[in-house]
Amino acid sequence: MTLNVVKGKFMWAKLTKKEQLTEDLWKMWLKPEEKFDFKPGQYCTIGSGGIERAYSIASSPDEDQIELFIELVPPPDGNLTPLLNELNVGDTVTMRLRAKGIFVLKPEFKNHVMVGTVTGVAPYVSMMRKHLNESESSDKNFIILEGASYLDEFGYDEELMLLDKSNNNVTFEASVSRPDEERNDSWTGYKGRVNNILLDRLDEWGLNPSETIVYACGHPGMIEDVKEKLENSDYTFLEERFWKD
């Protein structure tokens, strides 16, 4: 996508902090020059070097900076993330003025099952930070099921485990898909791809399907498989794809 610099459609956002998790995963915080309103679960569109892409927001709307969780995708598939990875604190990116997306919390459901792979956890972090302490959410159950290849790819596991420990209505579970590799030697959690263990976990949680919405965000293969598994059930399904195969 070529960035058309049209006045009134974008603003500048300054990089204020960057936290590298692995060689190809990092968090970055942006300070927009103007107030940026969004709903938890929505995405922002940022640009650098004439290229724009959309990224789900991990921060709450109550925070004054935009927090993103980004995975490096090298060329030819990735064009913007290599540029973002080279940015230093103080550098700027463009940001479209409006957040977009319908991947937001659906309050009519009692149970919210949030399935994500690696950076696909970002919208759920935003939802948890915003909604968890609101009175209308006290009678709802939130279950986050995150998958990754390696244990060091869970960018928000400590925060989510703390929410699990501190709230009776929050459950956080994680699974690695390559448990036998040396990088995962210390892993003691679930094993396998999240789409492959989801049905067993749903049975274990004992949720009423008609009162439950299952969200899926991240790898399109995971999303498609979850969608197929729930197709003939009474679960409601909502997806957010970062890209399409």
Image: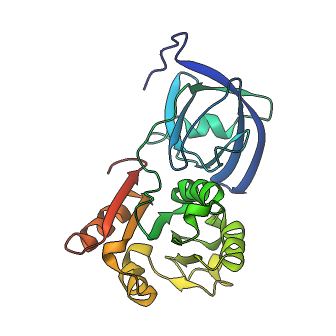
Residue at image location 59% in from the left, 39% down from the top: 82
The answer to whether residue 239 is above or below residue 111 is above
The answer to whether residue 135 is above or below residue 90 is below
Farthest residue toward the left?
A: 232
Asked whether residue 243 is in view, the answer is: yes
Q: Nearer the viewer, residue 107 or 30?
A: 107
Quarter of the image containing the N terminus?
Answer: top left
Farthest residue toward the front?
A: 135
Q: Nearer the viewer, residue 60 or 118?
A: 60
Return the x and y of residue 198 as percentages of the image width and height: 40, 78
Number of numbered tags placed on the structure image: 0
- Name the quadrant containing residue 195: bottom left
**Quick check: 118 left or right of 1?**
right
Return the x and y of residue 172 as percentages of the image width and height: 59, 75
Residue at image location 55% in from the left, 25% down from the top: 97
**Quick check: 53 left or right of 64?**
left
Farthest residue toward the top?
A: 7
Return the x and y of residue 155 as percentages of the image width and height: 66, 62
Return the x and y of residue 77 as percentages of the image width and height: 44, 42
Asked whether residue 143 is in view, the answer is: no
